[in-house]
Amino acid sequence: MTVLHLADEGEAADLAAFLSRLLHYDRSAAVRLQAAGTALAVFGRPPSFEVLAIRAVRLAKPYENGLDVTLDVTVSAGELLESVDEAAATAVVPAAVTGPPWAGVLPPRGGWRREAGLPAPDELQATVGAAVAEFRSRTRELAPERRTRAELDRIGREIWSRTVAETGLPVRAVHAAQSLGFLRPRGAADQGELGLLSSGAWLRLRTPYGSIAVRRAGLGALDVSVR
């Protein structure tokens, strides 16, 4: 049994909240865990958004039972959530599962550079709010015979594939950040860490609470990290 000793109760609560949000969108969600020393990265992919969500977790000490250098495993998000003990600030790593395709292709660990043009947090949240309102308005206006899943998906793709300002970041990435608790109202915490980074084909929206990574269209398979 591999036990993760999280830095404190707050880290345990944040990990549990992240896993709960992933399970809200996919009850059979899997997460990939990668760690070395006292830093743990939890990767998940909520299917509604087609993005990669990354939650960094601080550990109080390396793992027990021999895993004292690195950890790299794909597990059930539900089983991991059930093992989180917030009071004790611990979690037990479940048995490995056969990971979904996305779990084998992760963003590169290094080579990230800051991109300019990302709007302020309030503007990003307003962009998401406007997109949600537009989707609801356009779908309400559909005649009953046209209100099909295919038509709803078409409208959704059109809206959520739009980019934020001139950044190339799709609006769906910002929507995912907000829905997963990564993008919070001004005053909730220091938003100074909010930024947009790029590395090869990847864009990453970084917030104090986690990151959203997305592949940029038309760049092929550049700088993909297969692990």
Image (spheres, rainbow, N blue to C red):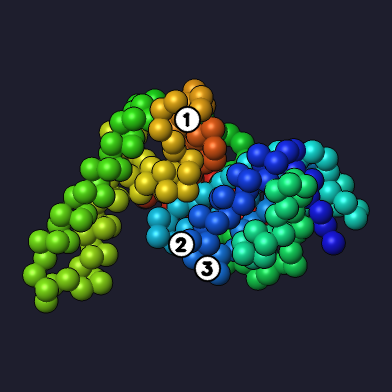
Element type where label 1 sits in the image: loop
Mark 3 lies on a secondary structure that is loop
Mark number, residue 25: 2
**Which sits in the foreground, 165 or 77?**
77
**In the image, is 119 to the left or to the right of 111?**
left
Rate crowding at label 2 as few (under 14), some (14 to 19) or many (20 or more) other CA atoms within 10 Å: some
Residue farthest toward the right in the current orientation of the protein: 66
Q: Residue furthest front?
A: 87
Residue beneath the point at 79% across and 38% down: 60
C-alpha gap between disc 1 and disc 2:
24 Å
Classify residue 76 as left or right of residue 137.
right
Q: Looking at the image, can residue 76 be seen? A: yes
* 3D distance between C-alphas at marks 1 and 3: 29 Å
Horizontal arrangement in the rendering, residue 11 relative to residue 224 (left or right): right
What amino acid does circle 1 point to? Ala
Tell me if label 1 and label 2 are in contact, CB under 8 Å. Answer: no
Residue drawn at point x = 30 percent, y = 31 percent: 123
Instruction: Residue 144 in the image: state x and y as whole percent.
Output: 11, 73
In 3D space, how far apart are the residues under numbered discs 2 and 3 (Cα atoms)? 7 Å
- Callout 2 amino acid: Tyr
Q: Position of residue 120 (x, y in %)?
A: 36, 26
Among the two numbered marks 1 and 2 on one chain, the one whose residue lies closer to the N terminus: 2
Q: Which residue is mark 3?
A: 27
